[in-house]
């Protein structure tokens, strides 16, 4: 690890004084150890300090015409480009109040005139070392923040990939494709965005929650892994007993996510949405759905979104029991379910953005869909 006190080039010191003799004395004292720049006014000092390469430290006279040292220092500290450059006041003023004012406006040190060369050199060396150490720590913190951000991004990508892989396994057993997952999660996100201004949903469908809904939607049918193939893949209508087993996929999905929550020692918003969607996406607004026959707002909003997304995609997709319907026919059938199958407000949002649903269906089209 590099030493924070090591520098590849000599530090640059800006000397600000309206008296040429004072500048000459300080320049002669410092030039062997440091690069120097000079300014004979506060205004000029501000320009030089903000220009590249910026000075590493400023020696600033207090008593100058037009813009005195105090005002110059305040302006330096108010500018983000120069705020972190340490300022040492050099002044003939010896009152405690003067030194206190200098420190209040942002100076790091206060040296009285006539100057003592050893003291000036010692103070300059000390504050340059402090600045170097602070910059080193700042760079290290930025590097660590970058590492944490990158690792978090990688973990999020891994989580998303794992979720899609799990969901794809369930969909594959049901003769569906990964595109069904892509379509439905995009439908859900589009619906949630459309409903953000709605008073009923503005507190639920925040930007953060929409992202989590998008990521959790692929798990809506994860419970199908627990349904026997003879039922799940049956190329004919299910009999009543088979249908009751089929409906259990919602319970299996909920229980699988509950096991994850138990393993983690608690839940979070993402798992909460995933559990709601898996368990309740087959519920209907009028209470005629399953597995619990919930009605109206008793059905979680996440599951009501999924109900619209899932039914639309089922309508435009080929199944063993039906052909793929064109988009407009699917929309007309969905409209008939307003207030019975679907939350009226969510269905209205769907109708308002049906063109976006069509675009999503076309983007993630497969041989089993006819979104036109």
Image (cartoon, rainbow, N blue to C red):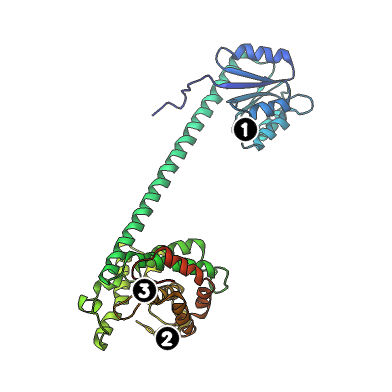
Q: Check if mark 2's residue and mark 3's residue have beta carbons within 8 Å.
A: no
Between disc 1 and disc 2, the foreground one is 2
Query: Measured from the top left, where is residue 148 in percent x and y?
Result: 41, 45
* Residue behind mark 2: 287
Q: Give the distance between the C-alpha atoms of the residues marked 1 and 2, in whole angstroms.
A: 66 Å
Q: Earlier in the sequence, mark 1 or mark 2?
A: 1
Query: Measured from the top left, where is residue 97 in percent x and y?
Result: 72, 31
**Figure check: 119 above or below 81:** above
Q: Give the distance between the C-alpha atoms of the residues marked 3 and 1, in whole angstroms.
A: 62 Å
Front position in the image: 225 or 297? 225
The structure residue drawn at horizontal position 47% and vertical position 64%, both measured from the top left corner, is 210
The structure residue drawn at horizontal position 44% and vertical position 83%, both measured from the top left corner, is 341
Residue 327 is tagged as none
* Residue behind mark 3: 317
Query: Measured from the top left, where is residue 202 in percent x and y?
Result: 55, 69
**Image quarter for residue 352?**
bottom right
Query: Measured from the top left, where is residue 269 in percent x and y?
Result: 42, 64
């Amino acid at each position: 690890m590099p030493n924070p006190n090591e520098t590849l080039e000599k530090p640059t010191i800006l000397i600000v004084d309206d008296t040429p003799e004072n500048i000459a004395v300080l320049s002669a004292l410092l030039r062997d150890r440091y690069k120097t720049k000079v300014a004979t006014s506060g205004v000029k000092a501000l320009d030089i300090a903000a220009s590249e390469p910026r000075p590493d430290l400023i020696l600033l006279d207090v008593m100058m015409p037009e813009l005195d040292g105090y005002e110059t220092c305040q302006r330096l500290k108010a500018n983000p480009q120069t705020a972190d450059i340490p300022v040492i006041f050099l002044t003939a003023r010896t009152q405690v109040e003067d030194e206190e004012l200098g420190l209040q406006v942002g100076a790091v040190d206060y040296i009285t005139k006539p100057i003592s060369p050893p003291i000036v050199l010692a103070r300059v060396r000390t504050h340059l070392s402090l600045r170097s150490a602070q910059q080193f720590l700042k760079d290290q913190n930025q590097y660590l923040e970058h590492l944490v951000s990158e690792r978090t991004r990688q973990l999020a990508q891994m989580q998303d990939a794992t979720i899609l892989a799990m969901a794809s396994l369930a969909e594959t057993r049901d003769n569906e494709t990964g595109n069904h997952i892509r379509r439905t999660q995009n439908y859900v996100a589009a619906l949630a965005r459309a409903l953000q201004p709605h008073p009923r949903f503005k507190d639920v469908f925040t930007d953060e929650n929409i992202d989590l809904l998008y990521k959790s939607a692929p798990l809506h049918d994860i419970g199908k892994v627990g349904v026997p193939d003879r039922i799940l893949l049956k190329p004919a209508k299910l009999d009543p007993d088979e249908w009751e087993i089929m409906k259990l996929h919602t319970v299996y999905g909920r229980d699988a996510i509950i096991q994850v929550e138990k393993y983690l020692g608690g839940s979070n918003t993402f798992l909460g949405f995933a559990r709601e969607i898996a368990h309740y996406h087959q519920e209907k607004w009028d209470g005629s759905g399953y597995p619990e026959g919930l009605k109206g707002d008793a059905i979680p909003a996440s599951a009501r979104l999924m109900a619209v997304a899932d039914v639309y995609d089922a309508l435009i997709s080929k199944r063993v029991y039906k052909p793929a319907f064109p988009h407009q026919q699917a929309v007309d059938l969905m409209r008939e379910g307003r207030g019975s199958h679907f939350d009226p407000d969510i269905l209205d949002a769907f109708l308002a953005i049906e063109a976006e649903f069509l675009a999503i269906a076309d983007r993630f089209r497969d041989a089993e869909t006819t979104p036109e």
